[in-house]
Amino acid sequence: MRAFFVICLATFALCIVVGHFPAGADTPPASTLPKVEAELARRGALKPASAFAGIGDRNARSLALYAEAAKVITHPRCMNCHPADRSPRQGAAGRIHIPPMTGGQDGHGPAGQPCTTCHGRENFVVGGENIQSIPGNPAWALAPAAMAWQGKTPGEICRQIKDPARNGGKDLEALYRHMAEDDLVGWGWTPGKGRAPAPGDQATFGGLIRAWIDSGAACPA
Ligand code: HEC
Ligand code: HEC
């Protein structure tokens, strides 16, 4: 079944009629991705934690595990929602959000134009040439300012996500659960038509975070 909706981008007073396709029509082959997203998709797979088990030195193993996990953490699918300037980003190149948008008081957007004006509970296929789909998730919101990652090195992000004062009060176990089980984090692997997913899958990523924590959660300098 296919239902039709009208989407309006208020800022541009622009309305388009789009078809809503059932989930599942959602993951296109890499060949149908736009050029920059296709390049991103080719960056390669995510190694499982077991690939690092042979590194005898505990600290070196932990660093190697984090470096692998950082392929996900620094991926545009995550970075675009963890900006430094309260303005979400779009696409593989992290361009400024169109229309211009800020997190507002609570990350859900400015009064009068919350994220939910356009972002629904699930990805929404538009099928346009420039915008193939609009991302969606029930928890869609901008990460708090304290959780800004954009412009930071993997080492800086590492120390930040371990710091309960800057990670929403999470100890390492809560951080693991967030990475391995949180549904909004999981969106990174089901980002909707026209977007390259984060490398690997959430379970493999969770396994890397588990092994990283178990080996001392070391951070690069
Ligand atoms: C739609 C926006 C959005 C996307 C996409 C997103 N995040 Fe977040 N992230 C948030 C919000 C909002 C919070 C705060 C909510 C909370 O603490 O539960 C957050 C918090 C976090 C935290 C808590 C600790 C901290 O210091 O940041 C981690 C870790 C995290 N996200 C990881 C990821 C990863 C990994 C990805 C990509 C696979 C990702 N996020 C993609 C919005 C997003
Ligand atoms: C007026 C409509 C509108 C509002 C309001 C809106 N967005 Fe968007 N957003 C879009 C559209 C359309 C896209 C898809 C654009 C594309 O893929 O080129 C998008 C894409 C995104 C992406 C890109 C994901 C990726 O990795 O490419 C992020 C992140 C995002 N929005 C976050 C937010 C957040 C957070 C809010 C609220 C603070 C918000 N948006 C409010 C319309 C909106």
Image: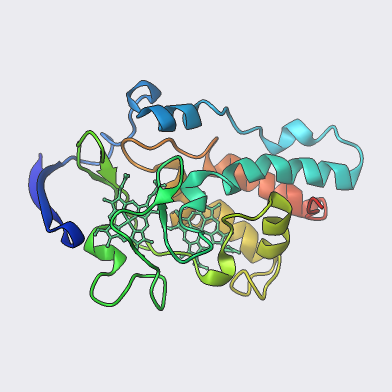
Give left or right: position of 97 versus 179: left
Q: Relative to 197, is 90 above or below?
A: below
7 and 182: which is toward the camera = 7
The colour scheme of the drawn protein is rainbow
What quarter of the picture does the N terminus occupy? top left
13 and 91: which is toward the camera = 13
Give left or right: position of 192 versus 13: right
Please identify the quarter of the rendering in which residue 28 is found: top left
Which residue is at 62% across, 40% downward?
71
Which residue is at 74% across, 42% downward?
65
Q: Position of residue 75 (x, y in %)?
A: 54, 44
Please identify the quarter of the rendering in which residue 69 is found: top right
Marks counted in the figure total 0
1 and 120: which is toward the camera = 120
Please identify the quarter of the rendering in which residue 208 is found: top right
Q: Relative to 210, is 189 above or below?
A: above
Q: Position of residue 14 (x, y in %)?
A: 12, 53
Which residue is at 39% across, 64% downward?
141
Q: Relative to 121, is 27 above or below?
A: above
Q: Position of residue 66 (x, y in %)?
A: 72, 46
Residue furthest to the right: 57
Q: Position of residue 143 (x, y in %)?
A: 48, 65
Give left or right: position of 67 versus 221: left
Which residue is at 71% across, 58% downward?
156
